[in-house]
């Protein structure tokens, strides 16, 4: 049985106990949320890993980071380093988006070395195989889609993105839309191109029940991808995005009827003022299932700093009810991220997630209060230990430390905390 099926029968699994302990919650609470479809617990039956996490309503906001090879940069050792950096800075999951090299070997090695959830996008494998055979990127059979989903599930993938919401009846709307960027989703563009060339329905949509059977067998959580997510601020919250969302809502119900856990992906690029409404709309249409957002990126003019633009959008989205943030690296829109980019992205997304969690539940502010007390006491060691990035905080302090002054080099003898202590607290 899947975690969803266990939950519906009122059975608390060992995985539920582990995930609930991390949250500081009663396992029975978590079980009920899973049974309602408002929480997912991605855990493939074919693998074991240390940091089992649940995603959804009433829980801490989780963070994912994407890693993976590409043409010209196919180095498994570097991807493992990225994985370990992501784990060090407490990413809750990674997605292996490799598109070059021995993809199955890379996938298996990343799964073997990962202590967190692993997600994938199976359609990449199908397209990469076609390119390697010197074919067109969309030159494959419908059956190839199903076979690659099965392969990923067998290998131990915990959740996978399937672009099942883009259908033939959207093709004409897409063609005639005033979007600046028609499709920015790689998986979505591959599916759309295949549909145009073959004049057939989206295989992920047409054979959705077969995919559900595979997911149920291995308890793979489906992440319903938004092929038509906005790739620019101009395109946000348009007819195409909303039309696909309605289709995803229908697929959510079908997945639940098969006992398959499911979450829904969201934008993308979006003005700040539209983010909350999008989260509310997704939750309403998709029956409250977990919402997984890429960013959202809130301005299009900051290449090299999109870990910041996405953290701003992610904080707003999560505070509004989104459950899962996909970290965006500084290299987004520019190139394949390096190891340091992965660190910067995870840290920025963790800041966004924690900031939003304080809005959701003030108990998450306890660690901030500990940090504040440590600052008041000029207790540097505790400040470093409580920091999201201990290493960076410690290095900055030590690089500009003044030996003669107890405070930091920003204020020196004019430290407000020392003055306050001398004239107010001890008076």
Image: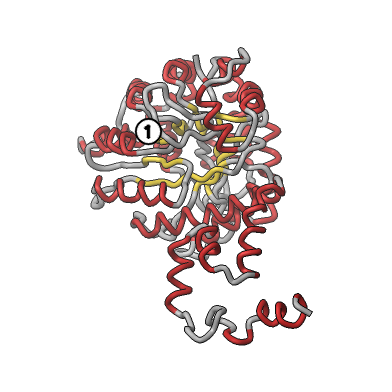
Which colouring convention does the figure follow? secondary structure
In-image side of 372 versus 331 (left or right): right
Image location (x, y in percent) of residue 158: 43, 30
State the residue in front, 270 or 113. Answer: 113
Q: Is residue 152 above or below residue 360?
A: above
Position in image of residue 93 (x %, y %): 45, 41
Q: Nearer the viewer, residue 59 or 132?
A: 59
Q: Is residue 363 left or right of residue 260?
A: right
Q: Going by the image, does 92 lie left or right of 69? A: right
413 versus 49 height, above or below? below
- Identify which residue is drawn at 58% across, 54% down: 352
**Looking at the image, residue 365 lies above or below residue 98:** below
Q: Provide residue 231's location: percent of width, then percent of height.
A: 52, 50
Q: Quadrant of residue 153?
A: top left
Camera-nearest residue between 299 and 263: 263
- Assign a secondary structure to mark 1: helix
Q: Write down the quadrant of residue 259 in the picture.
A: top right
Residue at horizontal 67%, vertical 35%?
283
Residue at point 61%, 65% (across, down): 374
Kindly identify which residue carries mark 1.
Answer: 123
Who is closer to the viewer here, 308 or 197? 308
């Amino acid at each position: 049985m899947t975690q969803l099926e266990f939950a519906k029968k009122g059975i608390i699994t060992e995985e539920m106990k582990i995930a609930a302990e991390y949250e500081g919650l009663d396992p029975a609470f978590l079980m009920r949320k899973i049974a309602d479809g408002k929480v997912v617990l991605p855990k493939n039956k074919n693998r074991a890993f240390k940091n089992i996490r649940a995603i959804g309503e009433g829980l801490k906001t989780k963070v994912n980071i994407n890693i993976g090879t590409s043409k010209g940069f196919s180095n498994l050792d570097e991807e493992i380093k990225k994985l370990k950096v992501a784990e060090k800075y407490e990413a809750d999951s990674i997605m292996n988006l490799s598109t070059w090299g021995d993809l199955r070997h890379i996938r298996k090695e990343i799964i073997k070395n990962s202590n967190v959830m692993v997600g994938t996008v199976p359609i990449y494998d199908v397209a990469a195989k076609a390119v390697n055979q010197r074919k067109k990127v969309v030159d494959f059979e419908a059956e190839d889609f199903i076979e690659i989903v099965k392969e990923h599930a067998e290998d131990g993938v915990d959740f996978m993105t399937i672009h099942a919401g883009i259908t033939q009846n959207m093709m004409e709307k897409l063609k005639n839309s005033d979007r600046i960027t028609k499709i920015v989703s790689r998986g979505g563009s591959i599916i759309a191109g295949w549909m145009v060339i073959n004049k057939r329905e989206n295989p992920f949509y047409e054979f959705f029940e077969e995919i559900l059977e595979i997911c149920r067998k291995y308890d793979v959580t489906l992440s319903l991808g938004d092929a038509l997510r906005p790739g620019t601020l101009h395109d946000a919250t348009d007819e195409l995005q909303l039309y696909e969302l309605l289709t995803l809502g229908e697929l959510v119900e079908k997945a639940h009827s098969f006992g398959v856990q499911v979450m829904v992906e969201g934008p993308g690029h979006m003005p700040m003022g539209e983010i909350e409404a999008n989260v509310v709309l997704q939750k309403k249409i998709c029956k409250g299932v977990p919402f997984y957002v890429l960013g959202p990126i809130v301005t299009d003019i900051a290449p090299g700093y999109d870990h910041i633009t996405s953290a701003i959008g992610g904080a707003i989205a999560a505070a509004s009810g989104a459950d899962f943030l996909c970290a965006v690296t500084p290299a987004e829109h520019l190139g394949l991220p390096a190891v340091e980019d992965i660190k910067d992205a995870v840290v920025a997304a963790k800041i966004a997630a924690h900031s939003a969690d304080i809005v959701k539940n003030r108990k998450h502010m306890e660690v901030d209060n500990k940090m504040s007390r440590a600052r008041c006491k000029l207790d540097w060691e505790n400040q470093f230990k409580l920091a999201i990035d201990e290493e960076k905080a410690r290095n900055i302090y030590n690089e500009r430390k003044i030996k003669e002054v107890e405070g930091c080099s920003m204020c020196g003898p004019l430290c407000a905390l020392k003055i306050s202590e001398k004239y107010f607290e001890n008076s």
